[in-house]
Amino acid sequence: MSKIQHRNLYLEVADRVRELIEHGELEPGERISEKNLCERFGVSRTPLREALKVLTTEGLVDLLPNRGARVIQLSIKQVKDTYDLMSALEGLSGELACQQISDAGIEAICALHERMLEHYRKRELAEYFAVNQQIHESILTAANNEPLMEMYNNLNQRVKRVRYSKKMTDEFWSKAVEDHEEMVAALKLRDGKRLGQILRDHLCNKLEVVSLAGVIEDEALLKQANA
Amino acid sequence: MSKIQHRNLYLEVADRVRELIEHGELEPGERISEKNLCERFGVSRTPLREALKVLTTEGLVDLLPNRGARVIQLSIKQVKDTYDLMSALEGLSGELACQQISDAGIEAICALHERMLEHYRKRELAEYFAVNQQIHESILTAANNEPLMEMYNNLNQRVKRVRYSKKMTDEFWSKAVEDHEEMVAALKLRDGKRLGQILRDHLCNKLEVVSLAGVIEDEALLKQANA
DNA sequence: TTGGTGTATTTTGAATGCATAATGCCCTTT
DNA sequence: AAAGGGCATTATGCATTCAAAATACACCAA
């Protein structure tokens, strides 16, 4: 029997707004109207404003005094900085995972890895991404470090929008798969230092940024053009 | 001329509550009475409640639905996890700092290092700590990575209480100073990989935890006895 | 006593109301 | 026509109010 959980309204609202941002229904830089969202969710301003304050602390929203809230708009530098940070966190997760993960856990990741390879061979990008993400999540979970998980997810949330819009070159893709081969090898040996190093250097964190620059600038230009 | 800044009340309140927690006026696990704090700060419940929500997302406060707020009380594992995470962040800050820091910046840190050594020789613990912290802050600043800084400060805030209460053994202390010698050497060579490695392994992050276990357990027992 | 039930009190959650700051628009002036 | 000033409108910040949940406490029964 699961515990009765009554969440507060502001948490629910925060989730919903997060979704709106993630799915692009609220665009970066867009002004968030309290009234508008209140009507949309059917709640009063109090829980909505509390939610906005939470989202501001999470770094997803920018709250200007007396001038309302906007969806955060990351500069290229901020995205790069965030990726650097996430790499470091992934590195740590690799080290910790090697110390803590069970044999079964390793096997599970190997299985995911095989599935990922299959999707790579078939050039199924969306499926590849999904499994890829599962692998990284599994390592993160195996690391068994709450604040690490929490921070990683928070950062991921911030860059999700731009992350999804990335293009994958063949060269980039094959390199990523190579990295994953090495990762699995290190994991099997429980070589934490090595896995950590690979994850820190993993191109998903580095190379991406290069192509990202394009995306962000395109969006910025587009916005200017429309304004 | 500095910009006119009018901060919202909830930010002010959040700062004040943070201080109360940091200085131990609100103890870990202690129930936070809304009414009490409202009267103390002379504000209505709205901004206070907003502040509590912010502090909850920051991980300093635990907000239970319909049952009020409490100051967060970290378990030994959580403290250990947080330290692991902070080590990784410090490591990253070292790598980045080496890439970005100016010659003048390096010299400034060397100067701080000399001052720290002086305090070490004179066994001036408080002064040593202060300068030590300045060094780490300088490196973090030199890394020039906003979200990194933000996260580090947040984590630091969470463990500040237990961090201050730590005891310093001679052996531990001398090892710490040795580490710092190596750090400065790596920094002078702008050897990011090396500085990163040293910082990740720096005992301030590792050894500390061992003695911490004692402190936290003592406090827990004390609390039980009083209850 | 001890355990449980029902009521009163306190505390929290959310909506509403009010004061103030920001925005938009029209009008004047040059 | 463009720039600036003033008024009306709107949005925000905070206080207050109302409703619901949790807590405390007294009372009763075993």
Image: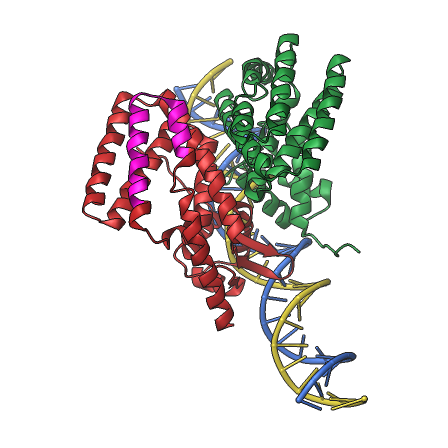
Chain colours: A green, B red, C blue, D yellow
Nearest to the observer: residue B112 or residue A183: A183
- Residue B28 position in % (x across, y down): 48, 59
Query: Is residue B184 magenta-colored?
Result: yes
Residue at 59% x, 55% y: name it. Answer: B63
In the displayed orientation, state which residue is furthest to the front.
Answer: A189
On the question of residue A71 being in view, the answer is no
Residue under the point 32% across and 41% down = B175
Q: Residue at x 73, y 15 (%)?
A: A120
Camera-side residue of D18 and B13: B13
The image shows residue A195, relative to residue A154, as above or below, that is above
Image: A167 above or below A185: above
B72 sits to left or right of C8:
left
Q: Quadrant of the N terminus of chain A?
A: bottom right
Q: Can the viewer see residue B156? A: yes
Q: Quadrant of residue B189?
A: top left
**Frontmost residue, D28 versus C20:** D28
Residue numbers of the magenta segment: B173-199
Expressed as whole percent of the image width and height from the top left, the position of residue B197 reads: 42, 29
